[in-house]
């Protein structure tokens, strides 16, 4: 977590920052001496400028505070007196009493320098403005002498508290946990794992704060694959495939949001009746490298119910709940329902890349679908002999592992009862290839399902290794895709 240290205390009176009241940390203070400022009645609020860790060694010592009286208030500007060299980090907070004054037009002026510097100025709470600036991977300096870092207008009167909302009020869906996986540990207990998700919390310390711009600078301009094994994926919060200035916006939208804990919930059918069976607190002190993705694990004990469905729900610092994750079980996972009209066909694609060891055996993959959908033999690969859905020309190779699905790998559709059917696949060979492409799918195989009643299509995707233990490898993307991180996956078109 970021820590603040007060370095400058300045008192404003008559439109002037009095240099005699400044600590020696300030190299210079400028103001309009002898002028009257309307609205403050001769009693200006105290302004405190504090260094936020991990700012560079000289911190706020290299900052000038300049004030210019205006018709109804004061224009406050913070200027880099000595500059901040390449690689230095600059973080500070400006605070004042929100009951007597409020700010408007808060701007990080240094951001106008372009792609050499990532910077942000934001009033996260009434009377508290955070500022940060770091150099990007493209080089440059954090600030040149004379650069304006931060500017705002200070006006008399209490701040409008209505515009400062709680973290849960921003967008609970943003904190939805992703990449759930079930596995067994050495003690033979089931363990549920998932990715921490809090857009804007790029340093993964639990709360969106000003120091989260550092990972943007470190990875600035880098391309990001939409897969679970790209550790930088959480920095690309706007999901445009590149880490750039656009990723600052989610910080502002979610500023101050903090994930306090995760509740683990269970349901017998995965649809209704979820109850809390456990809770895991977020460890705020864990230190990660910029770009690394934090992952949590919850070990079940006697409370585990075989075959039940489990999900995780984030709890924020206001003790309000975010959106639940998808629900998974030891037997598999299912997609969100997709609408298909009666007679409409769905193309189901099973793909694989970078497969883990030990799943090359019979019946390694099972796709479960509603009994109101019929398998359509041969329609996925018209003109192919035998009417098999397997298409040797449609299997993509050369990116990573090569899966071979021979024609007899498709078993007959199995009636499971309870309104469900299943189709199994086996993996007969696993040929390692390198290097793997992080943003390309490997081998694929298609088949079609036809709706006979117009019911929504829900697919359960199940994978076993050679010990019979189910693995998931999930990275959710769009509503109509289940992407197991370019490992094993299922997609519907």
Image: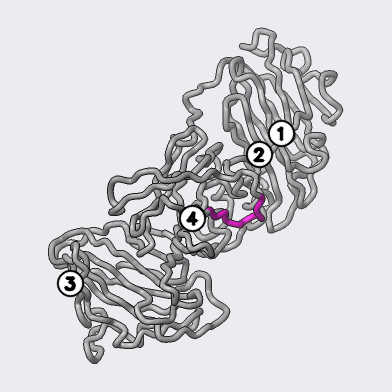
User: Which circle's residue, 2 or 3, is located before the other in the chain?
Assistant: 2
Q: Quadrant of residue 413?
A: bottom left
Q: Within 10 Å of the Cα at label 1, are there few (<14), some (14-19), or many (20+) other Cα atoms?
A: some
Q: In this rendered view, identify the residue nearer to me: 470 or 143.
A: 470
- For label 2, the residue is 109
Q: Is residue 493 located in the magenta-colored stretch of the structure?
A: no
Residues at marks 1 and 3, CA–CA distance in whole angstroms: 63 Å
The residue depicted at 41 percent of the width and 45 percent of the height is 277
The N terminus sits in image quarter:
top right
- For label 4, the residue is 194
Q: Is residue 438 visible?
A: yes
Q: Where does the magenta region start and end?
A: 287-296
Mark 2 falls on what kind of element?
A: helix
Q: Is residue 294 located in the magenta-colored stretch of the structure?
A: yes
Q: Within 10 Å of the Cα at label 3, are there few (<14), some (14-19), or many (20+) other Cα atoms?
A: some
User: Which circle's residue, 1 or 3, is located before the other in the chain?
Assistant: 1
40 in relation to 110, above or below: above
User: Which circle's residue, 1 or 4, is located before the other in the chain?
Assistant: 1
The C terminus sits in image quarter:
bottom left
Q: Is residue 72 visible?
A: no
């Amino acid at each position: 977590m970021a820590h603040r240290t007060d370095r400058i205390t300045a008192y404003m009176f008559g439109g002037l920052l009095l240099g005699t009241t400044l600590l020696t940390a300030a190299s210079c203070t400028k103001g309009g001496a002898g002028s009257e400022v309307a609205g403050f009645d001769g009693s200006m609020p105290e302004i405190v400028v504090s260094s936020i860790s991990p700012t560079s060694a000289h911190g706020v010592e290299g900052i000038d505070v300049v004030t210019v009286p205006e018709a109804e208030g004061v224009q406050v500007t913070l200027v880099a007196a000595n500059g901040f060299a390449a690689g230095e980090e600059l973080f500070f907070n400006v605070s004042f009493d929100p009951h007597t004054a409020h700010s408007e037009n808060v701007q990080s002026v240094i951001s106008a320098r372009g792609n050499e510097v990532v910077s942000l100025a934001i009033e996260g709470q009434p009377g508290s403005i955070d500022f940060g600036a770091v150099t990007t991977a493209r080089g440059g300096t954090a600030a040149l002498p004379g650069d304006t870092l931060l500017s705002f207008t200070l006006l008399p009167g209490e701040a409008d508290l209505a515009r400062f909302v709680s973290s849960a009020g921003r967008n609970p869906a943003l904190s939805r946990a992703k990449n759930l996986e079930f596995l067994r540990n050495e003690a033979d207990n089931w363990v549920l794992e998932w990715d921490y998700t809090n857009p804007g919390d790029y340093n993964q310390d639990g709360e969106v704060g000003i120091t989260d711009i550092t990972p943007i600078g470190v990875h600035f301009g880098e391309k990001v694959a939409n897969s679970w094994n790209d550790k930088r994926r959480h920095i690309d919060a706007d999901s445009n495939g590149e880490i750039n200035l656009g990723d600052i916006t989610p910080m502002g939208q979610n500023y101050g949001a903090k994930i306090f804990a995760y509740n683990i919930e269970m349901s017998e059918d995965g649809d209704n009746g979820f109850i809390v069976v456990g809770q895991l607190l977020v460890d705020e002190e864990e230190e990660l490298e910029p770009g690394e993705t934090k992952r949590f694990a919850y070990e079940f004990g006697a409370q585990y119910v075989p075959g039940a469905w489990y999900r995780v729900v984030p709890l924020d610092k206001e003790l309000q709940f975010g959106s639940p994750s998808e629900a998974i079980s030891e037997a598999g996972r299912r997609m969100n329902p997709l609408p298909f009209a009666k007679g409409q066909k769905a193309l189901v694609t099973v793909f694989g890349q970078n497969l883990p060891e030990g799943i090359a055996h019979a019946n390694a993959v099972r796709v479960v679908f509603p009994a109101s959908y019929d398998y359509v033999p041969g329609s996925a690969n018209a003109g192919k002999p035998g009417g098999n859905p397997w298409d040797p020309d449609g299997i993509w190779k050369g990116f990573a592992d090569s899966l071979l699905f021979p024609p007899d790998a498709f078993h007959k559709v199995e009636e499971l009862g309870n309104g469900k059917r299943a189709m199994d696949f086996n993996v007969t060979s696993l040929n390692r290839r390198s290097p793997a492409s992080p943003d390309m799918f490997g081998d694929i195989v298609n088949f079609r399902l036809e709706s006979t009643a117009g019911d929504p299509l829900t697919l359960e995707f199940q994978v076993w290794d050679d010990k019979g233990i189910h693995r998931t490898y999930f990275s959710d993307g769009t509503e109509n895709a289940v992407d197991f991180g370019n490992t094993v996956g299922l997609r519907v078109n």
